[in-house]
Image (cartoon, helix red, strand yellow):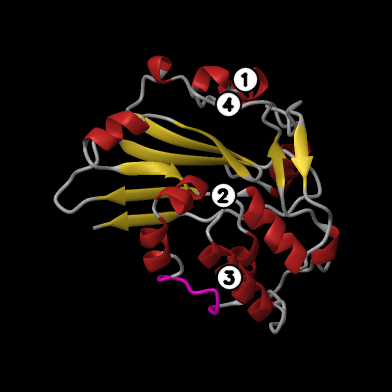
Amino acid sequence: MAYTEQDLKKDIDKKYEHGFVSDIVQEYAEKGLTEATIRYISTKKQEPEFMLNWRLEAFRHWQTLTEPTWAHIKQHKIDFQELIYYAAPKESKKLDSLDDLDPEIKNTFDRLGISLDEQNRLANVAVDAVIDSVSVATTFQKRLRKQGVLFCSMSEAIRKYPKVIQQYLGSVVSYRDNFYAALNAAVFSDGSFCYIPKGVTCPMDLSTYFRINAANTGQFERTLVIAD
């Protein structure tokens, strides 16, 4: 039986079974996009100076560009100054293990069918779980590291492997490529990083799950995969 326009309308009207918002205490950047916003994100991420400079270069280039229009699509014009570019679950302490993670965050991913408990995962899949502006958990890091595979959030990679990041970041799609590439480079808040050494076969599938929980935010993630 053919899927009709009426079927589509019914599906659109259905309530999302998992809920769009989880009850998580969060912190936010101030609304709007300026150089101060870029510096705020970089500071929150504890980034080295080269990353801040790279972000600022991308932002200044973005300011010279015109937002693209899309054929056959009617939409409200985006007001980029009405968005919040950083929203993150507020941590009360440093996480030493997944056991320290906010139970509500765990429950959120459980409801979505994505277990962050390595002992209960039946599938041979490592997951980097990102809520809004931060990665809250990456599973199976120790097991992967034994094979020489590095799998973590972009924020962690920038701090731990700055020379590798500086060499490869933006080498496939430059921030000069287009309007949204420049915007992403300026304000991305997290994402996933993977490095697989030459001659190594990754022992499991790798997966990233991004969830936007905070309303009125513009969340930009960036993923870097290096297969040596």
Q: Which residue is drawn at 28% across and 42% down?
A: 149
Is residue 184 positioned above or below 220 on the image? below
Magenta-drawn segment:
171-177
Q: Which numbered disc flags the more N-terminal residue, 3 or 4?
A: 3
Name the residue located 58 percent from the left edge and 28 percent from the top edge.
Answer: 94
In this rendering, which labeled residue sits more in front, label 2 or label 1? 2
Secondary structure mostly seen in magenta is loop
Q: Name the residue under label 3.
A: 53
Disc 1/disc 3 C-alpha distance (Å): 38 Å
**C-alpha distance separating marks 4 and 1:** 5 Å
**Would you say the residues marked 1 and 3 are in contact, meaning their CB atoms lie under 8 Å apart?**
no
The front one of 215 and 93 is: 93
Q: What residue type is labelled 4?
A: Phe
Circle 2 Cα neighbour tier, 10 Å, few/some/many (<14 / 14–19 / ≥20): many
**Of pointers 2 and 1, the one earlier in the residue sequence:** 1
Name the kind of residue labelled 2 in the image.
Asp
Q: Where is residue 74 in the image (x, y as percent from the top left)?
A: 79, 68
Kindly indicate whether the residue at mark 3 contacts the one at mark 2 (C-beta within 8 angstroms). no
Q: Disc 4, disc 1: CB below 8 Å?
A: yes
**What residue would you read off at disc 4?**
109
